Structures are given as C-alpha cells and as structure tokens.
Amino acid sequence: MQDPLLDQIPSLDLADFRSGDPQRKAHFVQQLGKAYQSIGFVALKNHGLNDAQTKELYANVQAFFQLPDAAKQAYEKPELAGQRGYISKGKEHAKGRNTGDLKEFYHVGQEVEDATDPVKGEYPDNIWPAEVPGFHDSTFNAYRTLEAAGQDVLRAIALYLELPENYFDDKVRHGNSILRPIHYFPIEDPDAVPADAVRAAEHGDINLITLLMGASADGLQVLRRDGQWIAITALPDQIVVNVGDMLQRLTNGVLRSTIHRVVNPPREKMNTSRYSIPFFMHPRSEMSLAALPHLVTADNPKKEADITAGEFLNERLIELGLKKK
Ligand SMILES: O=C(O)CCC(=O)C(=O)O
Ligand SMILES: [Fe+2]
C-alpha cells in the first residue's frame, strides 16, 4: 500500500533516540524512516540548541547582514566557489535556472583539529567578519551542536536501513558540512526585480541531510508526491531535518530528497527580511554514494551511476553557478 499523503511534516523528539530506552529509540527510528520514505522531511525538537544560544546566533547573523554591501563583499571569495565566507545577493540560482535567488548568505565550514587527518588539507580556512566579534563563537557552537544532532539522525537512519548503527560515523567524521546563515533581504520596489525571482527557487539539497533552523518563519514549502505544495509549520523550538540528494542516491531512492522552495511574501511585505540557518551535513569527499546493494532489488533497480561525494558536490556547484568549469 502507498503511504498516505501528509498535510504536515511529522514531529519527532530527538530525546527519544538519545534516551537509552530501547522502545523509545526504536519508535523514533521507525517514525523517522517512514517519514523519509514518504515526505522526506520531519520537524525535530530537543536537538541541543538552547534558546540563549539561538538568540545570540541570530543577533550576530543579523549584525553581519546589516553591514553595508561593500563591507560584506570584503568577505566574498569567488575563488573558493562559495565554500567559505559571504555570497552576495543574487549569486546562487537553483539547478536548471538562470535567475538568481533573492538572498545573500554566509558559509562556515569544517575545522579539523587533528593534523594527521589527510582531509584537513582539502578544506579552505574559514573567513570571519572582523566587524562582528561574536560571529565566530556563535556560528561555530551551532555548527558543532547541529553536527552532533545530525550524527544521531544518521545513526537512526542506519538502523532503519538495517545497517550497523555506526555506519555513517567514520564517513561524517571531519565531513565537509556547511552552516549557512541566510538573509532573504527586503525589497523596496518589487517591480525592480526579475518577474520570476524568488527567495529560494525549488530545489533538492545536495548533501546527506539538512538540519534547518528558522523554518518557523513563513515561506518554506515542500512538494508532496501528488504535486501539491504544502507549507512547513515548525514550532520555534523545532528544527526541520530533511533528506538530501546524496542520501537519496545512496539508498537508491528509498529515502526521498524532497523538492522544496521559499516563496516570496505578499507584495506589501516584500520590504521585510527573513532569516534562516540551514546546516548541510556532508560526508568526507571520498565517501561512495553508490547504491547500497541490499536496496537494489528487482522491484527497485539501480537508478544512478556510482559517484563519490566529492565528485557529486563538484558537479552541483557548477550547476548552481558557484563554481566555474
Ligand atoms: O530558508 C529556508 O527556509 C530554506 C533554505 C533552503 O532550502 C536551502 O538553503 O537549501
Ligand atoms: Fe534547501
């Protein structure tokens, strides 16, 4: 039987998984797996970020985006293909589009302390804005907290797929994850932007999973498999966690990377800001995204060619307009 069509994404509690109670843990695993086989998104509470941390993070992120454009552009490094620092207004467009999204954002990447790990040499250094001294600590605390939550979500996914619980652990250790504070900037004159410009055009995320803060503000919608767009309604203490294209590939389409978008507000509210902070959880570049053998069956033949995470990311950065061929 097909799964029912949901009007809302399911709400889960990460404390169930972390409780040490086998029944609560197994319940979490089943709820998560079922949601990822159908709508591809869940809302999650007890993710580890507390109110004070979250407030401080937003205050620093807002302070940065309020700087004049020229000051922000000092932190933009096109030679890093948008992998670190500031990415200015309209630079990124969704795969298959040319019109840039109505957003500006900042990328904070992995820091590898262990000098013996060869992956250390692959990552560019982070870039920190001198004008906002709290930016470093608040974004990096969030990075580590969301990385830990993401690791537990991946452990639950591994159990659901009947893999060892620690299947993803060494693949995401020092992984190429990115925290992306986004500012959907105010637009004073809606007629001055291209008619088809939106805050974030429809897309699937590249990475294994995304942990998104700020989806409680209006605008985020997901495409249900009957073609209907449904609004995400997360509570302020919830983050939204969804499957990305890398996990869809690895699972031969069993877990779904659902298309989503951020729509523009009504015309009279176009002059307001929206902030959100996704954490894109990536593995190390050498991870193979080849379909797991037990998920390739007569009913579900192999869908995509083998590729590594590093090769896949590279392809997509070119398609998004962030990297030159
Ligand atoms: O801002 C949001 O709510 C979603 C952003 C998003 O989907 C993305 O950056 O991939
Ligand atoms: Fe996204």
Image (cartoon, grey):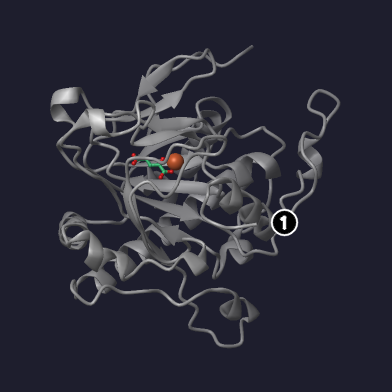
Q: Is residue 63 visible?
A: yes
Q: Which residue is drawn at 47% across and 70% down?
A: 110
Res 240 → quadrant: top left
Q: Can residue 47 be seen in this view?
A: no
Res 63 → quadrant: bottom left
Q: Which residue is drawn at 42% across and 55% down?
A: 149
The picture places residue 279, in percent across and down from the top left corner, at 41, 53
The residue furthest right is: 298
The picture places residue 312, in percent across and down from the top left corner, at 67, 52
Q: With respect to residue 55, does 220 lie above or below?
A: above
Q: With respect to residue 56, does 300 lie above or below?
A: above
Left or right: 187 with respect to 29?
left
The crowding category of the residue bearing disc 1, from other C-alpha atoms within 10 Å (few below 14, some 14 to 19, many at least 20), is some
- Quarter holding the C terminus is bottom right
Residue sitting nearer the eye, 134 or 63: 63
Amino acid type at circle 1 is: Thr
The residue furthest front is: 192
Residue sitting nearer the eye, 170 or 214: 214
Label 1 sits on residue: 308
Residue sitting nearer the eye, 42 or 262: 262
Ligand 2 is found in which quarter of the picture?
A: top left
